[in-house]
Amino acid sequence: MAGHRADPAEPDAVSPDTSFSKEPTSRRRFLGYLLAAPTLVAAAELGGPTVFGAPAANAAGDTGGGIPPSPQLADSYDLTDALVHAARPTANLITITLDENGHAHFELHRTEVGQGISTTVAMLIAEEMDLPLEHVHVTLADARPELMTNQLTGGSSSVSSIYYPVRTAAAVAKGKLLEAASLVLGEQANFLSSKLGVITSSAGRSVSYGDLATKAASDSTKQVEADLKSESDFTIVGKPTRRIDALDAVTGRKQFTTDLDVPGAKPTMVCRPPTINGTVGSVNNAEQVRRMPGITDVVTISSGVAVRGETYGQCIDAVNALDVNWGPGPVDGESDATVEQKLKDATPPAVIPPTPATKTLERQYTFAFVNGSALGVNAAIADVKSDSAEIWSTLKIPIAAQEAIAELLGMAITQVTCHVIPGGGSFGRTLFHDAALEAAEISHKIGKPVRLMWHRADDCRQGRVHPMSVGTMRASFANDVVSFEQHHASVRTDFGHGLGDAVSSSVATHVPGVSYTVSEAIFLLTTPSFYNFGITKTLLTETHQSPENNQPRGGFNTSSVRNVYSPNTATTRELFVDELAEKMGMDPYNFRRKYVKNEKLLKVLDKAAEVGGYGQPTPNGVGHGIALHHEYKQTMACFVELDCRPETVNRKVRDGVTGPRVTRGVLVTIPGHVVVNPLGMEAMMQGGFIDGFAQALTASVHLDRGSIAEASWDNFFYCRQWNLPFEFTPVILPAEESETPAGAGEMGVAPAFAATACAYRAATGTTPTHFPINHNDPLPFEPYPHEPPLPPSPTNGLDYAY
Amino acid sequence: MPEHTFTLNGKQVTVDTEDNVRLLWVIRDLLGVTGPKYGCGINVCKACTSHINGKAFNPCSVQVADVEPDDEITTIEGLADTVESDLHPMQEAWLDHDVVQCGYCQPGQIMAAVATVRKARDEGRELSDADIEGIRNVCRCGTYFRIREAIKDGATRM
Ligand code: FES
Ligand code: FES
């Protein structure tokens, strides 16, 4: 494992694989601002025409065999481009403030949910200002309506969007510091050098940033030019760097929403219906429940019946004691089988007709609903008064929350303050503001502050899930593949949170004359072509998208879950490529080598095969899979070795599932540009890889007549220590020439899912048609009842002490 | 309401609440100590893992009435004090291996790791991979690889 790891223990060691010698831009000049303030405040516009070059197109058809594919939108313009462009139109500023101790402060308009964005941004500022990393303080900005689509944390686009603006503001600040120091030290600015927050003259005299903070302050707001550091001079960016918020996390000091001490905001929970989005009828014993120990309030709201009390434990008891007449929900008639049938019925026949000279292969794979919970459950604090509302929650699109809450309360947006709190994970969940809106409704109705927390069972059963889908593949081939058609039928993904609007308006500008729905736009932006397979077509159809389903609580509660379509579309494509290879008499690796459409894909493919040891002999029941993917400005290949031998598959773990085990994994990437923090990117590669194989093997939820069976982590089988591969190697190859740094948060999921599916086929000789592969086995747990809704807390915890 | 007394992070505390309130809520909601996290309330996710008299346990599944006055409860906030230092060696290992992503599971992971190492020692053996695989704590961010490295390293420093 050692060879390719970024090693934090040796801060000076740059992993050779993460260097960025081929720098496309050396010193570059951008416009920034100095703001009138008592100490130095530098700013830059988010986006702006000078900052971004045109996105580089992927060259197609430049490797060996096959017929070049017909061009796909995502070959030249992808989701990252759309989100970066969505960040451009705002004429509003991000600012860096220097205090009198020489520390820089930055309010980040992105949300930290574990992806490490605050560390990345702190590194950019420290680099450009020549400050020690510890002297940079990053906090999360409240909702800022003027930022519009720019205050949005989604699609792994954060680093891509803010790389230049943040550096520009920091460069403006440093320029002004040098100017002020030149007066103090009596030397021209270009004879001065700056290091670790101190500026030194050629004569050896020095002055600290702290001493310059007021001297460098501007008494008027003005536009200035700033030179960005040349990337070849970077000493912090590109070095494996530990997270700046880790100390708080390991000491228990890091505060999440439910940890905040907002006066009067007592624990609050909601009694929810037994079926998805069921309706609330009458409550038969509200008064009685209100008199239970510790309970202060019981109130009916649109999603259920809320209780507020002294402790969450007492709220759980009160929720379970409520006697409510529930009405039906919008999807009570739906189960896994009915949804799967609808998806298959929605799949149109092949678009590309077969010819007498070609053979045809057609396959179909089904992907179950997947739980979208983070470990931190949905939570929000709300304090609604008659003329104002204050909200605290993990909000990836805080402006959308602010608008929705203002509308609910009949207030102006300016009367609603939304504080953005770091999240206990997100994976797409906190793109939505479900908890914040609900908390506002409860606080409004009872006239008191509330600290709303969803129970884990609620988070599993009424929380958002990754939609079920059916992937259909059709190819015609003779000596080469002449057509390749991929159809993705999916339950509607809810994009009602604003990300969709950002994307579709960018696409509308970029591809004039064609109008796409939000879903179509995102689908097209994430499905580039990979292989020289001739006429290439990808198509999306969504079910469950009638107007009623688009109402709040109108259909399934869906969202992206660490990626939108790609885990399922990549697995469909790559598994089918394996089947096609067999039909055409080649092994999966050499088949891909022959047909990949460009050198970058070939390079990552070969690297993954080499590091993983693809094709080395394995015992019976153990197999190798390899898969390709491109997204977020990353060109990736993943290798998986999967052990499907009975002694492994049948291991016993109390209340857990085992099954096939990934024994070795490799994820190789060529990133789009400088990797700001390779150690952070490796962490994302590890997490994404785990998500991918878990979704291939064990992780799904089961829908039965409108109810989800799963209610805990012992039901929803995401990876636990006993499922972990023995070995995983992330490999970051030198960056390609592009101006857009790559996104990392979701990158590993799709290729890992696909490679695991391919490895299963290699290990067992059986091609799975349903994912996860254990989804249609008898349920390995007894579902908790849906009424009363919450599994009561056990009392025998001490019996398990160790 | 009944009174309950026990030691929390080295200090004697007394709370007034119903007997059946689970200890997690007593610690978090009544005493304001928020290091132990809620992730399920049914002894599954292990985000609330803390120590009782030096052993790992899950306060979401213990009634406050079942805690005795001489019981010593330690949460992540009190871990370093047990070795009279700013950081416990396991916390240091966690930082060195840059384990943390969102951090929500990490207090529980660290408390579980310390107890797992101690248990192996008490049984007269060193930490094994099987011991680590026995740790049930969920990390939805997928920090499991680094957790595994950090526990092994932390064990050598304990
Ligand atoms: S909250 Fe205690 S084990 Fe999950
Ligand atoms: S670090 Fe996020 S759940 Fe473990």
Image (tube, coloured by chain):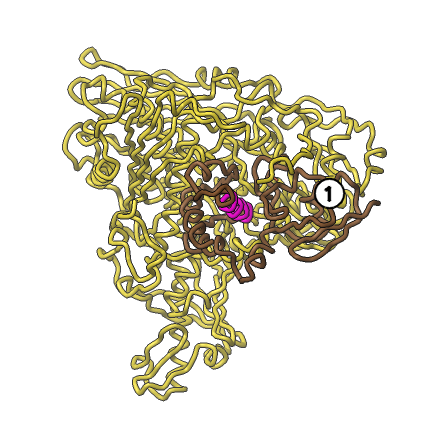
Colour assigned to chain A in the rendering is yellow
At horizontal 59% and vertical 50% (from top left) the residue drawn is: A256
Give the residue drawn at x 40%, y 47%. B149
Residue placed under numbered mark 1 in the picture: B64
Vertical position of residue A141 compared to residue A58: above or below = below
User: How many residues crowd around disc 1 within 10 Å: few (fewer than 14), some, or many (20 or more)?
Assistant: many
Residue B108 located within the stretch drawn in magenta: yes
Residues A211 and A386: in front is A211
In the picture, one chain is brown; tell me its letter: B
Magenta residues? B105-119
Q: Quadrant of residue A303?
A: top right
Q: Secondary structure at mark 1?
A: helix
Give the percent coordinates (x, y) of residue A389: 69, 52
| Front residue (pair A62, A722) | A722
Looking at the picture, how far across and down is residue A98, in whole percent? 49, 72
- The percent coordinates of residue A318 (x first, y second) are 76, 35
The quarter of the image holding the N terminus of chain B is top right
Task: Give the side of residue A719 with respect to residue B11, left or right.
Answer: left
Q: Quadrant of ligand 1?
A: top right
